[in-house]
Image (cartoon, rainbow, N blue to C red):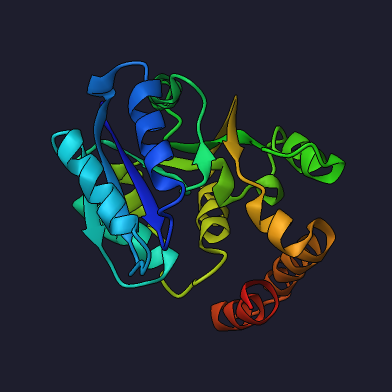
Amino acid sequence: MKISIIIPILNEAATISKLLWYLINSSKEKENIAEILVVDGGSIDRSQEVVEKIVYETNHKVKLIPSEKGRALQLNTGAASAKGDILYFLHADSFPPQDYDQSIIEEVKKGNEAGCFRMKFDSNHWWLRFLGWLTQFESKRCRGGDQSQFITRKLFDQIDGYDEDFIVYEDNDLVDRLFAIDQFVIIPRYVITSARRYREIGVWRLQYHFLNIHMRRWMGASSEDLYRYYKEKVVS
């Protein structure tokens, strides 16, 4: 089995090079990685230039794919081009554990066709450490895209991939559907993800808005309503 890693980006010139080299150098067996697909949603910084340089240096192990903006759309665009038996969706500021490829393949061999790692933030703030601690529990309420998500190509196609109506919350929607068919496992190893958004906006302010988004979704808010709130309260 081979893994296709899919990374959606938008203006990630400052971080993407470090992540790509980490993924290449931290895999257990380089042959396990079919490709690393960087799906750019229209970056206006040097992201494309940075990735294209690595494409050349890795002899096309890394590939740059253009896409319209929107994380669900970018993820599906990457999946459509992927050649691997397993799709591994990763944020540009999240670093999986050493030998991550072996951990994922072992789970698939056990019959677990989808899942994620646990997660820690690169911060000592007590609340962010608490959020990381929660990711050990087998509840869909403790899941998120920052933990990264793997899924077999076969299962991804069966559930019709990411719902492109979601501009935000697309990861949680996918997890909800996987939990509904009892196909999700949490690997007891940790992805380290950046707390940069919390540092930029403030821990309590951002956490309030994230909880608000979850509550709105549980109460039946549409994908458009969630994005409108996110755009107004988090991005602006």
Q: Which quadrant would the C terminus be assigned to in this image?
A: bottom right
- Give the farthest residue toward the top: 28
The answer to whether residue 157 is left or right of residue 140 is left
8 to 194, vertically: above or below: below
Question: Foreground: 179 or 48?
Answer: 48
Q: Which quadrant would the N terminus be assigned to in this image?
A: top left
- Residue 89, horizontal then vertical, whole percent: 41, 46
Image quadrant of residue 30? top left
- Residue 233, horizontal then vertical, whole percent: 70, 77
Identified at 69% across, 43% down, the residue is: 139
- Residue 93, horizontal then vertical, whole percent: 52, 46
Identified at 84% across, 60% down, the residue is: 204
Identified at 53% across, 37% down, the residue is: 116
46 to 84, vertically: above or below: below
93 to 233, vertically: above or below: above
Image quadrant of residue 22? top left
Identified at 45% across, 21% down, the residue is: 103
* Total numbered labels: 0
Q: Could you tell me if residue 98 is visible in this image?
A: yes
The answer to whether residue 23 is left or right of residue 226 is left
Q: Could you tell me if residue 183 is visible in this image?
A: no
- Residue 32, horizontal then vertical, whole percent: 27, 24
